[in-house]
Image (cartoon, grey):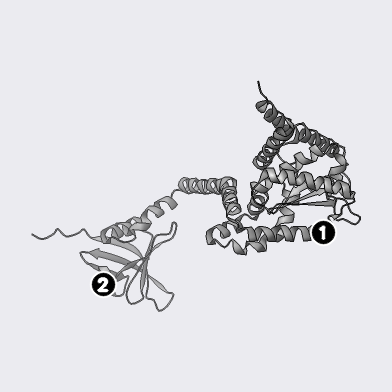
């Protein structure tokens, strides 16, 4: 039994001989396993159908069929060429793409989906990668981060030598050892006491304290002067120890790096991340911490204060004083414009943090 012959397919268009840019009106007839190209008023050429090459479709562009001798045939009859592709089993993988491209609403939906995924990656993906990269960063890199940051701040005259008395410094160092012994984490903790407003400073750090990734904590004379008890300062130091043990500073640095972080995560080249040390000062002093990071560090300090003194009041009090000082600052002054982001006053707001610390205390009180 023989197969029934396939119907004749006739396409109208123009032909190019492959040797010049001149074109001729032509017709391509397909019957059985042969294709015949009829040039109007000229020649007729036959080819085995399997030797034809059909270019993938492009919306709004004439379909192109190519012949072994370099000639080509172009036709606006998209439906006819699509039927020929179906007969030959050509360009099947691109047929679905073509249908999508032909529908503007589908393309618009795809664009919207792409934008949504991009936003989701920025909002959720980069922070997740940042936390993973921070956890995986070896201690040798953390050492570089701390060293480079301290050198940047000291050599750039952002910080100056402390003017606190030797006795006061020794008292604070002893309190810091108490905090770090409680915090654990096997970090090489050290407390650096510095003047936060030295003469000639590019901007004023002022009353502040901040932690570096490998356990270095910087506290300024101005913050010590603002405090009314060592308990308040120990509450601040416990807060900073929370940033160290949870690697918040490093997470913030990586999150600020954005797509660079993605490259690090994909290549796994965390050792060379020591070159990122230059990004640490800007991230710590300008970006501050996220809402979750500040809340987590406050909870660490709350646990320390409740265990040591039975109250979170010391940290609440100094936070309130910092809030008052900030409100009294002249926002229009040059000093204010160049002031470092206060790491004790980032998101969430100070009043929310004080409220949360009070909730921690109430939850741990008996009865």
Residue at the (10%, 61%) spot, across then down: 2
Disc 1 versus disc 2: nearer the observer: 1
Residue at the (38%, 57%) spot, across then down: 94
Q: Quadrant of the N terminus?
A: bottom left
Label 1 Cα neighbours within 10 Å, binned few <14 / some 14-19 / many ≥20: few
Q: Residue furthest top?
A: 367
Give residue 292's quadrant in the image.
top right
Q: Is residue 337 left or right of residue 289?
A: right
Residue placed under numbered mark 1 in the picture: 154
Q: Where residue 33 sits in the image (x, y, percent)?
A: 21, 66
Of callouts 1 and 2, which one flags the residue occurring earlier in the amino acid sequence?
2
Q: Secondary structure at mark 2?
A: strand
Q: Residue furthest bottom?
A: 19
Q: Is residue 182 left or right of residue 49?
A: right
Give residue 80's quadrant in the image.
bottom left
Judging depth in this view, the residue of 191 and 109 nearest the camera is 191
Q: Is residue 40 above or below residue 236?
A: below
Q: Where residue 324 sits in the image (x, y, percent)?
A: 84, 35
Q: Which mark is residue 47?
A: 2
* Disc 1 + disc 2, Cβ < 8 Å: no
Q: Where residue 67 sits in the image (x, y, percent)?
A: 33, 72
Q: Is residue 342 visible?
A: no
Q: Report how many numbered discs are placed on residues in the image.
A: 2
Q: Is residue 86 left or right of residue 311?
A: left
């Amino acid at each position: 039994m023989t197969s029934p012959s396939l119907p004749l397919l006739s396409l109208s268009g123009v032909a190019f001989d492959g040797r010049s840019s001149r074109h001729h009106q032509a017709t391509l007839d397909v019957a059985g396993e042969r294709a015949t190209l009829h040039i109007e008023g000229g020649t007729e050429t036959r080819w085995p159908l399997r030797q034809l090459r059909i270019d993938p479709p492009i919306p709004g562009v004439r379909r192109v069929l190519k012949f072994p001798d370099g000639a080509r045939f172009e036709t606006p009859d998209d439906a006819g060429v699509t039927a020929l592709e179906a007969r030959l089993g050509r360009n099947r993988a691109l047929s679905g793409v073509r249908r999508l491209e032909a529908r503007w609403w589908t393309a618009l939906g795809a664009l919207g989906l792409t934008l949504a995924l991009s936003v989701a990656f920025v909002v959720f993906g980069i922070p997740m990668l940042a936390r993973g990269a921070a956890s995986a960063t070896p201690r040798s890199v953390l050492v570089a981060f701390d060293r480079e940051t301290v050198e940047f701040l000291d050599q750039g005259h952002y910080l100056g030598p402390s003017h606190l008395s030797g006795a006061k410094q020794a008292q604070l160092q002893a309190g810091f050892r108490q905090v770090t012994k409680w915090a654990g984490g096997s970090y090489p903790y050290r407390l650096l006491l510095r003047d936060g407003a030295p003469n000639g400073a590019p901007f004023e750090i002022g009353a502040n304290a901040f932690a570096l990734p490998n356990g270095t904590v910087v506290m300024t004379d101005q913050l010590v002067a603002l405090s009314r008890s060592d308990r308040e300062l120990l509450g601040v130091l416990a807060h900073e120890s929370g940033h160290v043990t949870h690697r918040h500073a490093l997470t913030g640095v990586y999150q600020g790096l954005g797509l660079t972080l993605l490259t690090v995560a994909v290549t796994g080249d965390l050792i060379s991340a020591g070159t990122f040390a230059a990004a640490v000062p800007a991230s710590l002093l300008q970006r501050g911490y996220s809402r979750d990071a500040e809340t987590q560090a406050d909870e660490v300090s709350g646990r320390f204060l409740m265990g040591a003194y039975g109250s979170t009041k010391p940290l609440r009090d100094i936070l309130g004083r910092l809030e008052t000082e900030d409100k009294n600052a002249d926002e229009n002054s040059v000093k204010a414009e160049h002031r470092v982001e206060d790491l004790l006053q980032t998101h969430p707001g100070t009043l929310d943090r004080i409220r949360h610390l009070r909730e921690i205390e109430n939850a741990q009180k008996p009865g």
